[in-house]
Image (cartoon, rainbow, N blue to C red):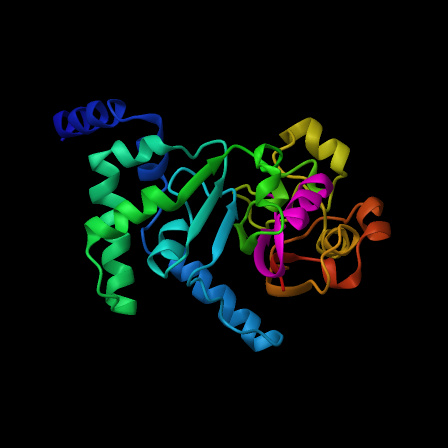
Amino acid sequence: MKTVKKILNRLFNNLSKEEKSILQALKKRPQAPYDFLTRYENILKNAIKWDDLDFNNKTVMELGCGPHLGFGPLAIYLGAKKFIAVDPTANRKIYDSKILLDKYFRLAFKDYKGIFRKQISFGVFFQELKNKTIFYNDTKSIPKDLYSSIDIQLSNSCLEHIQDLENVLIDLKKLMAPNGRYIHAIDFGNHMQTNNPFIEIYNSTPSKFKIKHGSKINLIPPSKMLNLFTKTGFNSPSLVPYYYFEENFELNIDKYWSNYLEESDYFLKVGIIAE
């Protein structure tokens, strides 16, 4: 058993940074992007007036797509004319990995084909993914000729990690097409393994949290994040709760949060801002 473990460890150590990142997370299932998108759209349809996103012939952008390209492969399969991948960990090296081709992209394709029945081969799909995906490290590096051209903007547990969020939202608004649409799923919890996701947040202050845990999350609460969308020019953003998590929080809430939070903010673990 130890010998097998050593062999597996040696194989894992020989993988590239991109391969390790994706396979560790897959744990990151190839089906996950479809599952997330379907779940989010069902939540939106049950809460607000919402029509499913139509990717056909659209320019799609994902902020924080990760090295596996997040919603990109699904968007390309569904006919997107272009996918803008905005993430410092994403690059074209992933296309050269046979491991990722077989363990991620091919399995994702099988899932899409089983669901949507589009008559296209994996080879054609993968070539389209390579040809239609454009990589940028951040929103500042996206050229102005893409302003007002993004039909669909997506992010999944990304916005809460951005410290300079207002300026990033300004960039996103500049990039958005006049009738563009967006879904941003935000995890407002502590991103730690605790009995309640708001331990170390509500019983502390942002400054104390950052001293202890660093700046991995911006601690912007739901109502304030929605206000940032309005402030930066998004016309009719809606914040739809996915779920709350009040259980197992037995600490005193610091006065900072008592004075700062709206009633609807308390214990909202995941929310979706969409239009």
Q: Position of residue 34 (x, y in %)?
A: 38, 60
- Name which residue lies at 83% across and 50% down: 260
Left or right of 262: which side holds 40? left
Question: Camera-side residue: 266 or 246?
Answer: 266
Q: Is residue 59 positioned above or below 179 on the image?
A: above
The image quadrant of residue 45 is bottom right
Q: Position of residue 208 (x, y in %)?
A: 74, 32
- Residue 27 visible within the image: no
Q: Position of residue 61 (x, y in %)?
A: 51, 49
Left or right of 62: which side holds 75? left
- Name which residue lies at 33% across and 50% down: 29
Question: Camera-side residue: 20 or 257?
Answer: 20
- Residue 78 visible within the image: yes
Q: Position of residue 151 (x, y in %)?
A: 54, 57
Residue at the front extreme of this rendering: 145
Left or right of 75: which side holds 23? left
Check if residue 185 falls in the magenta segment.
yes
Q: Is residue 228 positioned above or below 78 on the image?
A: above
- Name which residue lies at 58% across and 58% down: 182
- Name which residue lies at 71% across and 65% down: 236
Q: Quadrant of the N terminus?
A: top left
Q: Is residue 39 positioned above or below 234 on the image?
A: below
Numbered range of the magenta stretch: 166-190
Left or right of 241: which side holds 92? left
Q: Quadrant of the C terminus?
A: bottom right
Question: Camera-side residue: 222 or 196?
Answer: 222
The image quadrant of residue 205 is top right
Check if residue 27 falls in the magenta segment.
no
The image quadrant of residue 269 is bottom right
Q: How many marks?
A: 0
Question: Camera-side residue: 31 or 71?
Answer: 71
